[in-house]
Image: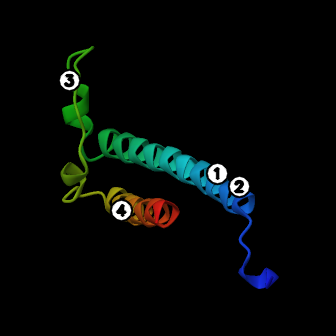
């Protein structure tokens, strides 16, 4: 039997498990970056808005809100987050493919 055609499924399983863990960590990083975007925008360009919110108010931030944020650092973080999200999708598809 030609050993070059033998695939050790345990090695592939181990690889897939490691890739899953990497994707989970990248998803955590994505959440951290999103938090940074909120922190920066509400401490400078959107500070007045943020300070006028009632305590306990719940607000849902979305990526599209940051597209036209006047703070270029926030928009750079948005670009990074989108690249990261794309990479996560590609890694997930590669692992499921």
Of badges 3 and 2, the one in the foreground is 2
Q: Residue furthest front?
A: 1
Q: Quadrant of the N terminus?
A: bottom right
Q: For the residues marked 3 and 2, what is the alpha-carbon distance in whole angstroms?
A: 48 Å
Q: Secondary structure at mark 3?
A: loop
Which of the numbered marks, if any, corresponds to residue 42?
A: none
User: How many residues crowd around disc 1 within 10 Å: few (fewer than 14), some, or many (20 or more)?
Assistant: few
Residue at 25% over, 27% down: 51
In the displayed structure, would residue 85 be above or below residue 5? above
Left or right of residue 14, residue 2 in this image:
right
Residue bearing the label numbered 4: 82
**Residue closest to the eye, 96 or 34:** 96
Mark 4 vs mark 2, CA separation in Å: 28 Å
Q: Residues within 10 Å of mark 4 (few under 14, many from 20)?
A: some
The residue under label 2 is: 14
> How many neighbours does mark 2 have within 10 angstroms: few (below 14), some (14-19), or many (20 or more)?
few
Query: Which of disc 4 and disc 3 is earlier in sequence?
Result: 3
Is disc 4 placed on a helix, strand or loop?
A: helix
State which tag comes first along the sequence, 3 or 1.
Answer: 1
**CB of mark 3 within 8 Å of CB of mark 2?**
no
Badge 3 is on which residue? 53
Task: Give the residue at mark 1.
Answer: 17
> Label 3 vs label 4: CA separation?
28 Å
Give the spatial CA distance, label 1 vs label 4: 24 Å
Q: Residue at x 23, y 33 (%)?
A: 60
């Amino acid at each position: 039997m030609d050993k070059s055609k033998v695939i050790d499924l345990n090695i592939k399983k181990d690889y897939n498990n490691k890739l899953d863990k990497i994707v989970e960590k990248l998803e955590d990083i994505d959440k951290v970056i999103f938090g940074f975007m909120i922190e920066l925008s509400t401490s400078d360009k959107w500070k007045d808005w943020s300070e006028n919110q009632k305590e306990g108010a719940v607000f849902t931030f979305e990526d599209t809100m940051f597209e036209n944020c006047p703070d270029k650092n926030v928009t750079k973080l948005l670009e990074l987050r989108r690249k990261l999200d794309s990479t996560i999708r590609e890694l997930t598809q590669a692992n499921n493919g």
